[in-house]
Image: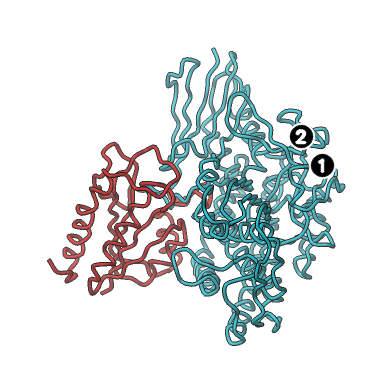
Amino acid sequence: MALLVLGLGNDLLGDDGIGLMAAEALDRRNIPGIYVVKSPLSGLYIVDLVEGFDDLIIVDSVIGDQPGKVVRLPLDELGPQNAPSAHYLGFAEALNLAKRAGVRIPNRVEILAMQIHASQVFGTRVSDEVVAGLPALMEEVMRVARLWGYEVGP
Amino acid sequence: MGKQIVIDPITRLEGHGRITIFLDDKGDVKRAYFQIPELRGFENFLIGRRAEDTPQITSRICGVCPTAHHMAATKAIDDLYKVEPTETAKKLREMLYSIFMLEDHSLHLFFLGGPDFVVGPNASKADRNILGVIQKVGLDIGKRVIQTRKELRGLIQELGGRVIHPVFGLPGGVAKPLTEDARKRFEAVAKNGLEFALFCESLFENVVLKNKAYVDMIVSDAYTHKTYYAGLMDSNNKVNFYDGHIRVVDPAGKEFARFHVRDYLNHIAEHSEPWTYVKFPFLMKVGWNGFVDGPGSGIYSVAPLARLNASDGMATPRANELYRKFYETLGGKPVHHTLANHWARVVEIVYAAERFFELASDTSIASNDIRNMPTEKPNEGIGVVEAPRGTLIHHYRSDEKGIVTSANLIVATAHNSARMAMSVDKAARSAIKGGVVNDGILNQIEMAFRAYDPCHACATHSMPGSMPLKVQILDADGELFKELTR
């Protein structure tokens, strides 16, 4: 069994960097059995990163009215199958396309997203409320990993 | 009572990629426009950063084509430091860039152009037929596309380093040489890439070009605009993605201008409209005459079709044969049908693969002479490449220490903004009459989206995911009147 935790985000876009920040924090813990990857990319590029893993936890952000709150995003609620353009190809569609094309994508996928402020500005600073949600996000990652049978410690 | 219709992509970022349609008192379309992203915020963000970091920083503008921004910025900082890259560095850069174009274009063709074979507003029977073909061969094609992409991505990562923000371009050269062993591997992948490109071409020919209904759709009036076209050309006026002069042809296909990117401000101006913050670039020497086509309007476009129109051919043999066939089939140069972009892309896929193979087969590319060190004081630099979706210009000024003091980025989507507004306008006019909105408007808007593939600039790797189209019809008071969602 191989578990990938993939942190997504853009570290130049304020709160959007939280997914990368969470991945970094997790990477520092050096937990055996968990691979950690960070990426600013989108669309089919994501497929290249997740191919071959059995299980996948995505750590990302989503605009919401309670910045710092962690939410689960069910994969099958992430939008239609056909994107109008490469610039709008979402993660769920990319995985779906890859699956249909016979790529070995993870069996289990959990998407954990931190709610962030709607008004995003260019800058490297993640807001305090969002950073405050980091421990809860990390704990949720560990909980899912344990649930799936990974020995990640306490 | 005037109404406003807003088609708003549900992205995480507000105000990006929005389509707005204004109706007049009779409920007919008064004006429609496509609101492209505001890059000013990003440009401000660059101020105070080191110029040599711009290739890494700007590659984070877009989660879809980071390589294009990386390369445009790299060329801009060559210019800023007044240093010419070595011949080896130029070859390595162009090879990396050809790999990127091959990968991005083929992705677009299969995964995004594909749906267009079935989404045509007029076609039904023929399109279902094409859908059948796609479905029948889908699995094998999908596997092959994904496998080839993976190989190509692997090479791009090898050149840039397997880190979150690859380092490749430096002022005067590149970060590391290609060993002879690596070159041989690249050459082997290039050979596969070339076979793959030819496979793309034959598939497109069999599935699309042999279907009269689809060809009729390409040449139909929808999204046809007789504008000027621009693209980067080599000294023989053949399409070049990495370097050359910008050439502009008029709506009759005659050369109108040919200039170095350093002179772009003498050729391109920006028009403002009171109803949007979007700036519409136009040809200064023709002038802005509203959202109309023809030789008297300075509106121009970029992207695969524009590149082919602005050129005298392709620099590699097979691509050049396809180029000739393209114009023979579509009735001569220039071709004004926006939907022909998909076919033009196929011609460019073959060119990218042939060029990649040429460069990877050249043993001199494995030289260690990869960088000229800058010795002069930096002040101003302008760089240009052809991104998959068109001409991309980066322009920086810096102080003596190389700290950025101003930045101006013109992305492909910006060059196309006026023409895109015209396409949206045309689609809107055919779908909205007397206040009655035909649900087909979503299809038609989507077609325009796919043909231009507009950039929304910020790396929204995108939760919640995709961009469902949403049409909001608002009355003059801003009240919601009707909503359509896919």
Residue identified by numbered label 2: B293
Residue B232 is tagged as none
Colour assignment, chain B = cyan
Using the rendered image, report if marks 1 and 2 lie on a common chain: yes
Q: Look at label 1 and name its amino acid.
A: Pro
Image colouring: by chain
Q: Quadrant of the C terminus of chain A?
A: bottom left
Q: Residues within 10 Å of mark 2 (few under 14, many from 20)?
A: many
The residue that appears at 28% across and 69% down in the rendered structure is: A3
The residue that appears at 64% across and 78% down in the rendered structure is: B191
Foreground pick, B88 / B197 = B88
Asked if B420 appears above or below B214 in the picture, the reply is: above
Q: Are marks 1 and 2 in contact (CB under 8 Å)?
A: yes
At numbered mark 2, what does the secondary structure look like: helix, strand or loop?
loop
The residue that appears at 29% across and 48% down in the rendered structure is: A114
Residue B144 at x, y percent in the picture: 53, 71
Label 1 marks which chain's residue?
B
Residue identified by numbered label 1: B251
Left or right of B375? Residue A74 is left
Q: Quadrant of the N terminus of chain A?
A: bottom left
Foreground pick, B74 / B376 = B376
Residue B353 at x, y percent in the picture: 67, 70
Residue B133 visible in the snapshot: no
Q: Earlier in the sequence, mark 1 or mark 2?
A: 1
Residue B350 at x, y percent in the picture: 69, 67
How far apart are labels 1 and 2 at the CA level?
A: 8 Å
Which chain can be seen in red? A
